Amino acid sequence: MIVLIEGKLLKATPLSATIFAGGIGYAVNIPVTTAEKLPLNGETVSLHTHAVYREDSQALYGFWSEADRDFFALVIEKVSGVGPKVAISLMSKLPLGSLIAAISSENSTLLAKTPGIGKKTAERIIIELKDKLTSFPAASGTSDTSSTDQPVSPQEGESSKLEDAALALQALGYKQSDAKKAISKVIETLGPNLSTEALIKAALG
């Protein structure tokens, strides 16, 4: 099992990272909360990983912290009907501390706002995980919220930023038209001076 990968970051999007390590380029699926912490392309990055093997495919999922990785594994292994895609969507919407807090306080309404998770699935997540979170850091419910204040880098084109954000929302379960509407609404409310990751998180929220 591959549990950690460290190498040069070749390319990154809000939901993926390509890392060159040991002469091999690895495609790693990541949540938005990890993407917003990645360094610039060409710099060294280290991600905690979880590999998912199926009969017709194999995929590698990466996370900024070991706790994030362990939570992802817990979700897909213990909650029936929730696979990697939905788990990534859940972790893209909220940082780990807020997820732990929502589950511990049985806040199914907050969890159900995630694309791909309805009220019943949110309740199932709470039932299946509430008693399995003792090994995770204490929930603050407010961690990792500073990204909405991060300005867009000068190199990042406006149209590219909006397109990347819309594509990420589609990958998380939004219809194309709904994704564009959600991004437009965020820009109208908060203005355009947000990172791609901050746009996505605001749209999800």
Image (tube, rainbow, N blue to C red):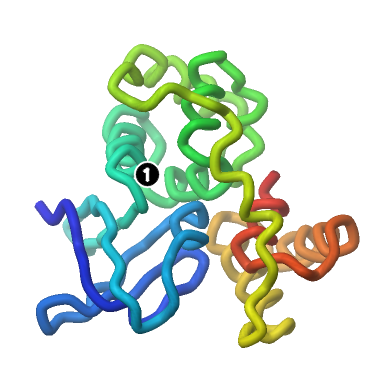
Percent x, y of residue 94: 56, 41
> Camera-side residue: 167 or 69?
69
> Camera-side residue: 121 or 156?
156
- Residue ID at (47%, 64%): 15
- Residue ID at (37%, 44%): 83
Q: Residues within 10 Å of mark 1 (few under 14, many from 20)?
A: some
Percent x, y of residue 165: 64, 68
Q: Give residue 25's quadrant in the image.
A: bottom left
Percent x, y of residue 91: 48, 44
Question: Which quadrant does the C terminus fall into?
Answer: top right
> Camera-side residue: 61 or 38?
38
- Residue ID at (63%, 78%): 153
Say what secondary structure mark 1 lies in.
Answer: loop
Percent x, y of residue 49: 24, 54
Amino acid type of the residue that numbered disc 1 sits on in the rendered structure:
Gly
The number of numbered badges drawn on the structure is 1
As drawn, which residue projects farthest toward the right? 188
The relative height of residue 140 versus residue 147 in the rendered view (above or below) is above
Q: Give residue 144's quadrant in the image.
A: top right
The relative height of residue 112 versus residue 144 in the rendered view (above or below) is above
- Residue ID at (31%, 56%): 61
Question: What residue did someone put label 1 on?
Answer: 83
